[in-house]
Image (tube, grey):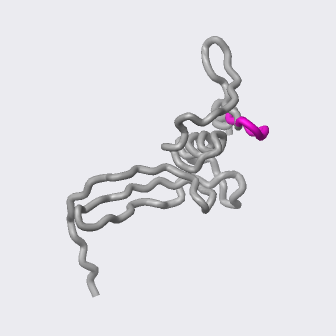
Amino acid sequence: MAVLVEVKNAVIKKAIIDIGDRGFLTASLHLDYGVCMQQFGGFALYLPKSFDHHRLNSSAGHFIFRVLQIAGVERWDQLQNQCVRVKATHSGVIEIGHIIIEDWFNPLEDFKE
């Protein structure tokens, strides 16, 4: 039996990058057709070191995941007004760290792998 595929126009109501309750990085779009809505995405884009299949194949995924993790939030839009610790020189920020726990993110170190 053939599956009916329709072409529709949609408005993106939300674009979310998050860690979510499954513990890995995902991205999704919330699409509004006017009469109903659907979600697109939700695939695992990055598995952190706690997963058996972790590999640093995506520097973008690793960067986004670690920034969310350091800030203690699940979604990119929750970053605003969050507090982090910073290791910096006059010329720039070297690392950001979680405000309470001892967890630091230094992209130059992480991307050496």
| The C terminus - image quarter | top right
Q: Residue furthest bottom?
A: 1
Q: Position of residue 21 (x, y in %)?
A: 60, 61
Residue ID at (62%, 47%): 56
Q: Left or right: 100 with respect to 55?
A: right
Is residue 58 located in the magenta-colored stretch of the structure? no
Q: Residue furthest front?
A: 81
Q: Position of residue 61 (x, y in %)?
A: 55, 46
Residue ID at (29%, 59%): 32
Depth check: give the residue in front, 100 or 42: 100
- Corner quadrant of residue 102: top right
Q: Position of residue 99 (x, y in %)?
A: 71, 35
- Corner quadrant of residue 68: top right
Depth check: give the residue in front, 67 or 4: 67
Residue ID at (60%, 56%): 24
**What's the magenta region?**
99-105
Relative to 60, say whether 26 is above or below: below
Is residue 103 located in the magenta-colored stretch of the structure? yes
Residue ID at (25%, 57%): 10
